[in-house]
Image: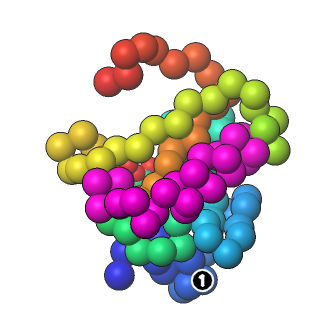
Amino acid sequence: MTIFAKIINREIPADIVYEDDQCLAFKDISPQAPMHVLLIPKQAIAKLTDTNEEHKHLLGHMMVKAGEIAKQQGHDEFRVVINNGAGVGQSVFHLHLHLLAGRGFQWPPG
Ligand code: AMP
């Protein structure tokens, strides 16, 4: 079980900012920007590349919620990041969107 599954199950605490039947959003424990929220599906999906056509509704729902959560946190401008694989920085193998805002970001990221 990943640490995010434990957050879903309330086995470890988190600063939860949004929850519905499909997903959960909470503040990153090591924020990289003034707003750094993680949005995760409740379904245990390790990586974006583990999704398929069956997950289209869930993924679309999460993208809509990403925008709503950022706005609710006071940010019209924000960045969404998904690290897919250890080689690009994924450390928790439960799919998550990083929602980042409140400072300038470089492009390309890296
Ligand atoms: P990634 O490196 O893309 O897999 O992102 C994992 C993120 O989870 C990192 O930004 C961590 O700071 C964050 N994180 C790890 N453990 C916790 C936790 N218990 N509560 C909140 N965020 C966490």
| For residue 71, side relative to residue 16 (left or right) | right
Residue 69 placed where, x, y %? 73, 47
Residue at point 58% right, 17% down? 104
- Residue furthest to the front in view is 53
Residue 10 placed where, x, y %? 60, 83
Residue 26 is at least partly visible in this image: no
Residue 20: quarter of image: bottom right
| For residue 70, side relative to residue 47 (left or right) | right
Which residues, given as a range, are shown in magenta? 48-70
- In this view, 34 is above or below 60: above
Ligand 1 position by quadrant: bottom left
Residue at point 51% right, 19% down? 105
Residue bearing mark 1: 10
Q: Main secondary structure of the magenta part?
A: helix
Residue 80 placed where, x, y %? 53, 36
Residue 45 placed where, x, y %? 38, 68
**Quadrant of the drawing holding the N terminus:** bottom left
Q: Is residue 103 magenta?
A: no
- Depth order, front residue of 11/39: 39
Mark 1 secondary-structure assignment: loop
- In this view, 2 is above or below 95: below
